[in-house]
Each structure stands twice: as structure tokens, then as C-alpha cells.
Amino acid sequence: MTIWIIGIILFGYLVGCLHGSTVAQWFSGVNLKESGVKNAGASNATIVLGKRFGALVAIIDIGKGIFAILAVRFIAERVGFSVESLTALLFLVSVAVVFGHNFPFHMKFNGGKGTATIIGVLFALDWRFGLAGLLLFIIFALLTDILVFGVLMLYGTFLAAAIWMVGVWPIVIAIALFVMAIWKHGENIQRIRNGTEPRIRAVFKKK
């Protein structure tokens, strides 16, 4: 089991390192880590490059979350793990792929914030939690006009999914990911306090 755990963590991390922002840079020539709010995620791609590039980055980053979960599920089910072990492995790869997105080795361990990737993870774990998380994300983001409030709803949904499923380890993993999300969004929270956080309506006025 130890080999499986190490292999899944490494696999998830490397998948997470495949960044949509890198693809956006190939096409636009713009390094998102040096522009806008200096974040390699879909929201900053939208701020700096517009909605089309924001969508491109989001699709790639959502897709890698889906891929990581489906790949581990496909292999682990055929090995014959128990439901509890399978669930723990799926949550483990979930954290690994988000961690890889947030701390990619090729960006000096300073990447995005995992929003699009956690959406993909939720849908791949259970489409019902994915849909619930996405709706909460949209509702809270639009009501507050601040993206980070919607993002926290995604991680809250991930924690709810862990509580709903079998075993203690998914809950521990989900709590750790929630704490990481709050820490990773520390700058956003500070900008909210200062009144300088970009508003969603202003961002989506860009072409």
C-alpha cells in the first residue's frame, strides 16, 4: 500500500504541474506570473488576457483534475481495493493534483491557487458534489462580486464530500486542503480588507 500511496502522490503532483497558464503563455507571449495579480490561474488569465484565454486556462486546469481522479479510479478498481481504501486514494490524488497546480516545480513552486482544478476533482469524484460546488461557487462569487468567496465554497463542498463518503482519511485530507486554500488566498483576503481586490464585474468587461 505504501508504494501505491507514493506513486499516487507523485502522479497527482506531476499532473497538477501541467499548467493551463503555460499554454496561454505559448499563444500570447504573456507570463501570468509577472502580470496582473501575478497568479498562474484562470482568474488572472481573464484579468490580463481576457475571457477567451481565461476559458482556455480553466478548461486545461479543470481537465487535469478530472483526469487524475479518473485514472486512479480506473486502475485502483481493477486492482481490487476496498471501498474505503479506494476512497482514500482518490482523495489523496485530489490533494496531490491541486498541490501540483499550486506548487509546480517548473515555476519555482509558486503556481496557481487550485480553483479550476478543484472543480474538476469534484466532478470526477461525484458529479453531484461537482454540480453543487459549481453552483455555490457561482452564486457566492456573483452575490459578493468577489471570486475568493465562491472559491471557498468549492473547498467547503470538497470537505462535505469527504464527510459523506467512507472513512476518516478523506476528512483529514479535505481539512488539510481547505487550510491550504485559505493560506494560498491570503493575498486575496488582504486585498479584500484593503478594498483593492478585483471585482468580477470589472474583470468580465474585458473582451
Image (cartoon, rainbow, N blue to C red):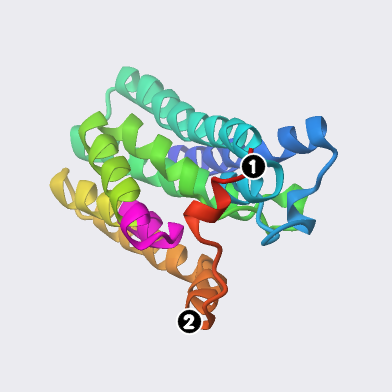
Where is residue 147, by image quadrant? Answer: bottom left
In the rendered image, the vertical position of residue 63 relative to residue 88, given as above or below = above
Q: Is residue 99 left or right of residue 70?
A: right
User: Mark 2 packing: few (<14 Cα in 10 Å), some, or many (20+)?
Assistant: few
- The answer, for residue 113, to whether it is visible in the render is yes
Q: Nearer the viewer, residue 4 or 105?
A: 105
- Mark 1 crowd level (few <14, some 14–19, many ≥20, 10 Å Cα): many
> Where residue 67 sits: x, y (%)?
47, 26
Q: Identify which residue is drawn at 72% across, 51% down.
A: 105
User: Closest to the observer: 64 or 73?
Assistant: 64
Residue sitting at 40 percent across and 68 percent down? 179
The quadrant of the rendering that contains the N terminus is top left
Amino acid type at mark 2: Arg
Q: Which mark is residue 193?
A: 2
The residue sitting at the bottom extreme is 194
Residue, disc 1: 17
Q: Main secondary structure of the magenta part?
A: helix
For the magenta stretch, what is the residue range?
141-155
Cα gap from disc 2 to disc 1, whole angstroms: 31 Å
Q: Residue 165: horizontal and vertical position, in percent?
A: 17, 43
Q: Which mark is residue 147?
A: none
Residue 95: x and y in percent read 44, 49
Q: Is residue 2 visible?
A: no
SS at mark 2 in the image: helix
Task: Name which residue lies at 27% across and 29% down.
Answer: 81
